[in-house]
Structure formats: C-alpha cells, structure tokens
Image: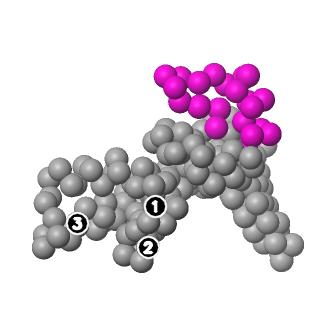
Amino acid sequence: MMTNQIMIFLIDTILGLFSLALLLRFYFQLLRVPYYNNIVQFLIAVTDFIVRPARRIIPGWKGLDLSTLVLAWLLECIIVSTVYLYQGFDFGSNMISAGTVMGLLGMVEIIKMTLYIVLFMIIAQAIISWVNPYSPIAPLLNTFTQPFLSVFRRRIPPIANVDLSPLFVLIVIQLLLMVVAGVHMEIRTILD
C-alpha cells in the first residue's frame, strides 16, 4: 500500500511537471509570449526532444502547435490511468469505456491545469507589478495575462487608479474550477 502511494506520487509529480512544461510551451506560443525569454527557452530545451518527433505525426493547425497540446493530454491520460491502476482498478473488464473515461479525465486535468496556470500568472503579475514592475519576467506575465484581463478591463474601469480586472478573473477561475471538479466527479462515476 505504501509502495503504491510512493509510485503514484512519483509518477504524478514527474509526469505532471513534464505535462505542465508542455502545456506552458503550448500557451506561450499561442499567446505570443516573447520567444527569447529565459523561461520560454527553458521550456523549449526541456520539451524539444519529444515535441520535434511528435510534430511529424501530429500536424499543426492554423499556426497552433497541436503536437505539444496532444502530448500534454497523453501524459495526463497516462497519469490518470496509472493512478487508477495502482488503486486496483481492473481495466480488462471493459477496455473501451475505461479508455474513453481515461481520455476524458485527461482532458479535465488539462483544463484544470490551464485554469491553475492562468490563476498563478495573474497572481504573479499582480505581485510583481507592486514589488518590481520592471522585472525581466514582467513582459512574459503581461503578454500571458492580457487576453484574460482585457475582457474585464473593457467593461470595468479602474476605481481610484486600482485595476480590479485581476480580481474578477480570479473569481471566474474559481467558479470554473468548481465546475471542472463537478465534471470530474461525474466522469469518475462512470467507472464505479
């Protein structure tokens, strides 16, 4: 039992971090984050060994690097399947429905991770704007968060020079995380 928990932790941590790196790489490209930023260069260096060969199999679409997104999803499917396997789930009884559920749970995990990425980026941007607005990471955070914040900035003007758009984005993210948790539970009930 303890060995299973250790294995689940290790697989979830190692593959989860790699999946996060792939997802960040996808979103940084999608949102046109400056390419020569150190963080972007790190993500490219860490993930290039698997992304380049995957691009031969999974083509891009309208300028999107779908191979990176698909790889992140596949890693999440592997994590979810491994956790279920170590918890004693029998995949042999109905392989097709179990595979479908693992794929759906992988998608839910990607959506959840995306919401947490946006949440973290907005909080980091707010802190850096107060502490050190000229930090080298500020352009990366500004580029990443701009599409999310601009939705509220167009509708809600600053109050006494305080931009409340991050607060509203964080509220929406929390609501979406609740919805995602509910969807996750609904999908899990299919297996039970």
| Amino acid at pointer 3 | Asp
- Give the percent coordinates (x, y) of residue 32: 48, 40
Count of picture labels: 3
Question: Upstream in the sequence, badge 2 or badge 3?
Answer: 2
* Residue at image coords 70%, 27%: 55
- Label drawn at residue 138: 1
Can residue 117 be seen here?
Answer: yes
| Amino acid at pointer 2 | Asn
Question: Upstream in the sequence, badge 2 or badge 1?
Answer: 2
* Residue at image coords 86%, 72%: 3
**119 relative to 78 in the view: left or right:** left
- Give the percent coordinates (x, y) of residue 15: 74, 55
Quarter of the image with the C terminus is: bottom right
Q: Secondary structure at mark 2?
A: loop
Which is in the foreground here, disc 3 or disc 1?
A: 1
- Give me the C-alpha separation between circle 2 and circle 3: 17 Å
Instruction: Using the image, determine if residue 101 lies above or below residue 169.
Output: above
Question: Upstream in the sequence, badge 3 or badge 1?
Answer: 1
Q: Which residues are magenta?
A: 47-68
The residue identified by callout 3 is: 163
- Give me the C-alpha separation between circle 3 and circle 1: 17 Å
Q: Residues within 10 Å of mark 2 (few under 14, many from 20)?
A: few
Q: Residues within 10 Å of mark 1 (few under 14, many from 20)?
A: some
Residue 26, by quadrant, is top right
Labels 2 & 1 near each other (Cβ < 8 A): yes
Q: Secondary structure at mark 1?
A: helix
Which is in the foreground here, disc 2 or disc 3?
A: 2
Q: Secondary structure at mark 3?
A: loop
| Amino acid at pointer 1 | Ala
The residue identified by callout 2 is: 132
Can residue 123 be seen here?
Answer: no
* Residue at image coords 59%, 31%: 66
